């Protein structure tokens, strides 16, 4: 019998984190779920996968060389047999009941993509812990088609969608490949999105990942890549110049300019500034707040808190 849902997990050289991610899938307690682990050119994952064969329908795929997250996910999607697809990064986790809630919403028949609230944690979360995780932020944003033109507010971890030939990442997009897919599905394929107002997944943002000998220089270089990626996405998905979407895109670019200026003064950016920016702009956009009213407060989003 074919599985109802296929979980796609790209991974590379993070055996411990992969083990925790698989533990979180096994804890969903569903026999109709398969897991496709895509080894993106890293060390063998078979020893970790073998630990779960008695609890999960799990298959490893190994790429001969690193292909990147879009290509790795696509390889997993091509191998998937489920009616629905779900994504899980190897350093993130599902929380109990996530897949039950997602499939129940999809079974109602009036939606093609559901996304649970993704809690953001700055410490590693045990998916089997009895107590709810401590979260520093969350992507808990209601669906709004217009705001999808401004920023990506839907992390791939937490998304469950109907499997189709169109559900593929563009391997030519190296930054914001998930945002590009959501836009294509919504605008060109007519996919209907719904937010599930429950914390279903945890997205890990661990400060130790950012430690370096040159935090200002490295931070500025990373910011430059994301800034260029954002500009490319705006060019690919153009909006009318006199639209609220265009005005709010300009706010995003103003935040980037404030961030570059901080780095040029030898200062780093506050943790979770991106999440604060999304929340501020999402709230303002849905409320119909003119962009000019938000501009004076943008620099404060970058402060350490």
Image: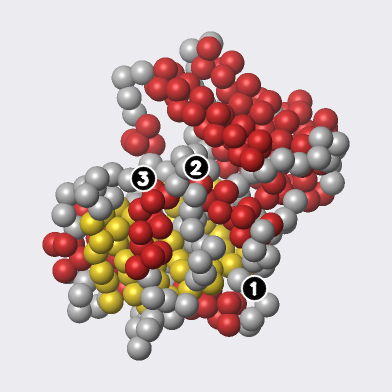
Name, please, the residue furthest toward the left.
47
- The residue at 43%/61% (across/down) is 87
Foreground label between 2 and 1: 2
Q: Are marks 3 and 1 in contact (CB under 8 Å)?
A: no
Residue 217, position in %: x, y? Answer: 42, 17
Tell me if I can see residue 128 in this picture. Answer: no
Residue 145, position in %: x, y? Answer: 72, 55
**The N terminus - image quarter:** bottom left
Q: CA distance from mark 2 to mark 3?
A: 10 Å
Tell me if I can see residue 77 in this picture. Answer: yes
- Sequence-earlier tag: 2 or 3: 3
Q: Which residue is mark 2?
A: 173
- The residue at 56%/19% (across/down) is 260
Residue 67, position in %: x, y? Answer: 33, 45
Q: Which residue is mark 1?
A: 111
Q: CA distance from mark 3 to mark 1?
A: 29 Å
- The residue at 51%/62% (across/down) is 167
What SS does tag 3 mark? loop
Q: Which residue is mark 3?
A: 68
Residue 271, position in %: x, y? Answer: 49, 34
**The C terminus - image quarter:** top right
- The residue at 37%/84% (across/down) is 2
What SS does tag 1 mark? loop
- Sequence-earlier tag: 3 or 1: 3
User: Toward which corner of the image does residue 276 lie, by quadrant?
Assistant: top right
Depth check, front residue: 58 or 166: 166
Numbered tag placed on residue 21 in the rendering = none
- Whether residue 263 sits left or right of residue 51 in the image: it is right
């Amino acid at each position: 019998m074919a599985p109802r849902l296929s979980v796609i997990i790209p991974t590379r050289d993070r055996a411990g984190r992969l083990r925790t991610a698989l533990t979180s899938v096994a804890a969903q307690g569903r026999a109709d779920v398969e897991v496709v682990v895509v080894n993106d050119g890293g060390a063998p994952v078979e020893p970790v996968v073998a630990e779960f064969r008695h609890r999960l329908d799990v298959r490893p795929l190994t790429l001969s060389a690193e292909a990147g997250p879009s290509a790795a996910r696509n390889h997993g999607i091509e191998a998937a047999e489920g009616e629905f697809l779900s994504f899980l990064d190897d350093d993130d986790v599902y929380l109990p009941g996530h897949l039950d809630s997602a499939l129940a919403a999809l079974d109602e028949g009036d939606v093609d993509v559901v996304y649970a609230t993704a809690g953001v944690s700055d410490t590693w979360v045990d998916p089997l812990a009895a107590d709810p995780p401590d979260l520093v932020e969350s992507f808990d944003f209601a669906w709004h088609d217009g705001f999808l033109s401004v920023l990506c507010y839907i992390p791939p971890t937490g998304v469950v969608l109907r499997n189709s030939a169109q559900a593929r990442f563009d391997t030519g997009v190296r930054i914001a490949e998930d945002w590009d897919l959501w836009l294509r599905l919504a605008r060109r394929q007519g996919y209907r999105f719904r937010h599930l107002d429950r914390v279903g997944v945890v997205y890990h943002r661990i400060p130790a990942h950012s430690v370096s000998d040159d935090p200002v220089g490295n931070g500025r270089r990373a910011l430059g890549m994301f800034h260029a990626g954002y500009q490319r996405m705006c060019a690919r998905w153009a909006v009318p110049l006199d639209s609220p979407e265009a005005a709010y895109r300009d706010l995003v670019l103003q935040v980037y300019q404030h961030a570059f200026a901080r780095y040029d003064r030898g200062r780093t950016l506050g943790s979770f500034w991106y999440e604060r920016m999304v929340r501020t702009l999402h709230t303002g956009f849905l409320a119909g707040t003119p962009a000019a009213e938000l501009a004076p407060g943008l620099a404060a989003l970058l402060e350490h808190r």
